Every structure is written in structure tokens, then in C-alpha cells.
Image (cartoon, helix red, strand yellow):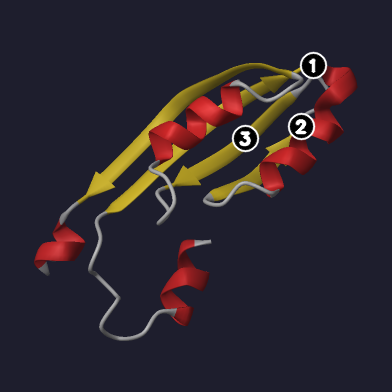
Amino acid sequence: MRIDRFIQASPEEVGQTPANICGVLVHANPRRQSEVVCALKTISGVEVHRTAEDGRIVITVEDTAQSWAGETIKQIQELQGVLNASLVYHHFDESQVRGESFQ
């Protein structure tokens, strides 16, 4: 997802906003998992990575122009069939905006 945005961005846009990436574990009712996965795929800034038969879904959530990642996670928690959505990883990097590098 992030690489697609980078490729499509104009040179002026690259590095203008900080990286904000959230790893989220979604627990869905196993009987409604496919419905939940379909709903997740329609949400801007969400990428589905893995699913398990017991209702677990691994996703990443990024800030978008429409909403920040925290609001998107809240929206996910309110989807029909979602039992819980837990933030398990968070990366926020302002160094991209400031032009810093870690070499």
C-alpha cells in the first residue's frame, strides 16, 4: 500500500507527511469473517494481510487524507461481525518530513 502511494505521488508530495503505520489484529465472528474481510477491503488506508479460520484477521492501517489511523481503527471496531480490534504495532516517523535518515 505505501509503495503504491509512493510510486503514484509526485516528487513534491514524497516525504511531506510522517509515516504512521498501525498493525492491528481483528477478531471477527468466524461465521461472519468473509463479510468482515470484504468490509475491511473497502476502507481507505486498510490492507488485509492474513486470515485464520478462527476469525483472526491481520491488517495494517495507515493515515489517509480522509481520516487518521486511530479513527479508522475505531470504525473497524464498530463493524458488524467484529468482536475486537487490537493495536499490536505502531510506527510513527516524522523523520521523513524533516529529511532525516538513519544510516
Q: Is residue 53 above or below residue 100?
A: above
Q: Secondary structure at mark 1?
A: loop
Q: Secondary structure at mark 3?
A: strand
- Which image quarter: residue 10? bottom left
Give the residue type at disc 3. Val
Which residue was labeled with disc 1?
Answer: 29
Q: Position of residue 84 (x, y in %)?
A: 60, 15
Which residue sits furthest front? 66
Q: Is residue 35 left or right of residue 57?
A: right
* Quadrant housing the C terminus: bottom left
The mark tally for this picture is: 3
- Which image quarter: residue 82? top right
- Residue drawn at 59 percent across, 29 percent down: 76
Which residue was labeled with disc 2?
Answer: 36
Closer to us: 92 or 50: 92
Closer to us: 95 or 71: 71
Q: Is residue 33 above or below residue 29?
A: below
- Residue drawn at 62 percent across, 35 percent down: 58
- Residue drawn at 70 percent across, 48 percent down: 41
Q: Is residue 43 left or right of residue 4?
A: right
Which residue sits furthest bottom? 11
Is residue 100 among the parts visible in the rendering? no
Which residue was labeled with disc 3?
Answer: 58
Give the residue type at disc 2. Val
- Which class describes the residues within 10 Å of circle 3: few (<14), some (14-19), or many (20+)? some
- Which class describes the residues within 10 Å of circle 1: few (<14), some (14-19), or many (20+)? some
